[in-house]
Amino acid sequence: MANSWRISALRERHLALGSNLEDWNGMGTAWTYASDLADHHEAIRTRAGLMDVSGLKKVHYVGPHAESLLDFATTRDISKLYPGKSVYACMLDEDGKFIDDCIVYRTGPNAFMVVHGAGSGHEVLIRSAQGRQVAVLFDDDLHDLSLQGPKAVDFLAEHVPGIRDLPYFHHTQTKLFDRPVMISRTGYTGERGYEIFCKAADAPIIWDGILAKGKDLGIIPCAFTALDWLRVESYLLFFPYDNSQMYPFADQKAGDTLWELGLDFTVSPGKQDFRGAGEHYRLKGQERFKIFGVLLDGHVAAQNGDTLWHDGRQVGVITCAMYSRLTERSMAIARVEPGIAEQGVPLEVRGSLSVKAIAHTLPFDDPEKKKRTAKG
C-alpha cells in the first residue's frame, strides 16, 4: 500500500476482500477486490452495492462568514440552501478554469459541510477563511459509506423510518443500527443511492450490518474502480482524470472551462460574483474541446489515452472507458474537438485497440435522470 496519511476504519475489511489499498487522496482505498468488477457494476445497476468512499475530503465550515465564503468560492447560490439541503457545485480559479467540484451540505444556519474530491478547492477555502469569522475543521473521523442501486432504498426503508420520502440532494440526521448517522440521497453512480456518514468507530458495524442484513437483496461490497464503469454511462467526471491536468495542451497551462466540461449548469442563474466569474463568462464560445461520449464497435473496452480519429486526423482522446455486459456496449468518455461533438459522427479508435466508433451524446444510461430522482 502507498504511504497514506489517512486511514480507513474499514482497512481490514478491504484487505480481507483482496484489496491492496492503493492510495487515493491520501487514504488507502480499495480500488479493486479479488472479485470481478463486472459483478460490482451489475450489482449496482440491478440490485445494490456498498462502497467505502471515505477518501473524499470532508470539511466543516462554521461561523457567520461561512455562507459568504462558500458563495464566493463556488458557482452556486449558497443562500438557497436550507438545513437538510445540499447542492453539487464547482470551484474555479481566477482564470475561470475548473479546479475542483464538491457537494455543499447545509447542516445549520451558519454551518456547512463540504465534501471534495482531489482538486485544490480545500486549500483555496482554507486560505480565504483566514481573518474571517469561520472555523474550518477537516473531519477525517467522519467516514462515508455509499449504498447505491435500485434496492438501496428498500434496504434502508427496513431500518430508517421515512427514508423513502427523502428527496434527491437532501440529507437527514438519523440512526442506523442504533448508531448516529447522516444519510444523504447522493452518490456517483447515476442510480438512486445514499451516502451514509458515520463516525470511524461505527463504520465497521454499519458496513458489516448492511452486508449481512442486505444479503437477501443481493447487496455486495463493491470496489472503488466500479465507479469508473458507472460514471462513463452516467456522464460523471472525475478530477483530474478527464481534465487537462491529465491530457495537457502542448502550449497552454492546465485548466478547463465549465463550457468545455459541460458543467456550466452548476452556475446558478444570474450569479456573477464568484471566483473567476468574469473569465468564465468571457470564455463562453471559445471552447477548445468538448466532453462527449463515444460508442465503440465490438465487445472490448478502450483504454484511457486511446486516440480518436476522423477523416485521417486526430480529433480527440478517450479519458475513461468501459464495456457493459448488461447492455453489451463498449462506451467511453472523451475530450473531442467541438465540431466532433455531435451524435453519430464516425470515428476510429487507435491505441490499445483499433475499431470503428461513433460520437454519442451523454449520458448513455438514464438520460432523463429518472432513476436517481425517483420518488417513493
Image: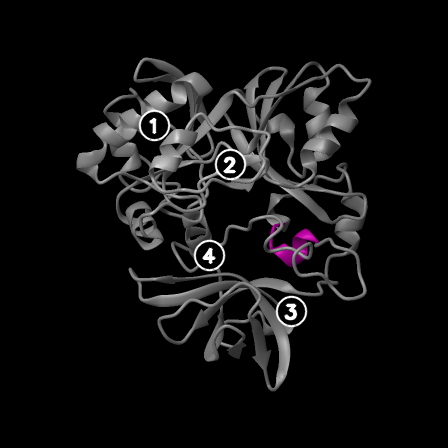
Mark number displayed over residue 207: 1
Compared to residue 219, the image places residue 63 above or below, namely above
Image check: 317 left or right of 32? right
Q: Which residue does the numbered mark 3 point to in the structure image?
A: 338
The residues tagged by marks 1 and 3 sit, at their Cα atoms, a distance apart of: 44 Å
Mark number displayed over residue 28: 2
Q: Position of residue 148 (x, y in %)?
A: 36, 39
- Describe the element under mark 1 as helix, strand or loop: helix
Q: Image quadrant for the C terminus?
A: top left
Comes first in the chain, label 1 or label 4: 1
* Amino acid type for the residue under numbered disc 4: Val
Q: Residues within 10 Å of mark 1 (few under 14, many from 20)?
A: many
Q: Which residue does the numbered mark 4 point to in the structure image?
A: 232
Q: Residues within 10 Å of mark 2 (few under 14, many from 20)?
A: many
Comes first in the chain, label 3 or label 2: 2
Q: Which residues are magenta?
A: 257-263
Q: Residues within 10 Å of mark 4 (few under 14, many from 20)?
A: many
* Amino acid type for the residue under numbered disc 3: Pro
* Amino acid type for the residue under numbered disc 2: Gly
* Amino acid type for the residue under numbered disc 1: Trp
Comes first in the chain, label 1 or label 3: 1
The residues tagged by marks 2 and 1 sit, at their Cα atoms, a distance apart of: 17 Å
* Residue 306 counted in the magenta span: no
